[in-house]
Image (cartoon, rainbow, N blue to C red):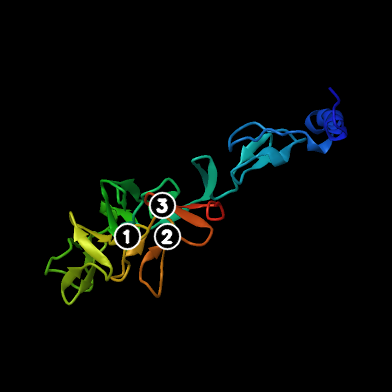
Amino acid sequence: MKMSLSVLLFAAVLPALVFGGSSRIMPTMMPGSRCGLDQPQACRGGSHCINSVCTCQTGSTVVDGECVVLVVAPPLAPCVDEATVCGGQSVCTDSICKCPPGMTLRGHECYRNNEVSGVVPPSSVACTDASHCTGGSTCVNGKCTCQQGMVLSDGWCQFKYAYPGETCARAEICVGGSVCSRDMRICNCPERTIQIDNSCLEGLGSIH
């Protein structure tokens, strides 16, 4: 049986494609894996080879093998994904950034109880301008009241939040990486992202 010229040429070139030159197949490493200086491009998920380790940039963390920018959420904001970090000395409890036991929320910061005085719980009628309303509320017309866009739940003023695809027409906070559309008033995933469950995942919007 005679072999065609194209087959012979392919057989001659194949070893060079696989084993030699810049065309050799390179392994890819997830963030946190070891990497070499001779193959820094092998790091995937947005990581870079730093000190022989595939490392995410400062201010980001690894979520499902990808480097995702950390989002600092204020007290009473939702913390529904791994990329969200609670700020103001709050901690993530039941998917909400709350002040830990022994601390009280004042403004956007959690303070130790012995650092605040004259505290009044939300919905109380006893507050004055000098009182420190708790639970994230403020003193309005002599009553500790939750700010607009927040509701009272278990003694705390909590943001009303909406997942991708849900309405944001009543000042709801869009979560999961979504943003509120000015026209439709719906929480939509940004460009180059795609909705999976209750989150917008980056880098998948261009995949067809």
Residue 133 seen in the figure: no
Q: Which residue is mark 2?
A: 178
What residue appears at the point 77 percent right and 33 percent down from the top-left corner? 24
Does 199 sit above or below residue 37? below
Q: Secondary structure at mark 1?
A: strand
Q: Secondary structure at mark 3?
A: strand
Q: Which residue is mark 3?
A: 199
Pick out the residue farthest to the bottom: 141
First in sequence, mark 2 or 1: give its number.
Answer: 1
Q: Tell me whether circle 2 and circle 1 mark residues in contact (CB < 8 Å).
A: yes
What residue appears at the point 31 percent right and 60 percent down from the top-left corner? 161
x and y percent of residue 68 in the render? 52, 49
In the displayed structure image, the side of residue 106 where residue 60 appears, left or right = right
Mark 3: which amino acid?
Ser
First in sequence, mark 2 or 3: give its number.
Answer: 2
Closer-to-camera residue (157/61): 61
Does 62 sit above or below residue 7? below
x and y percent of residue 114 in the render? 26, 52
Q: Which residue is mark 1?
A: 162
Pick out the residue farthest to the top: 1
Residue at mark 2 to residue at mark 1: CA–CA distance? 9 Å
Mark 2: which amino acid?
Ser
Pick out the residue farthest to the front: 1
Residue 96 seen in the figure: yes
x and y percent of residue 71 in the render? 46, 54
Location of the N terminus (image quadrant): top right
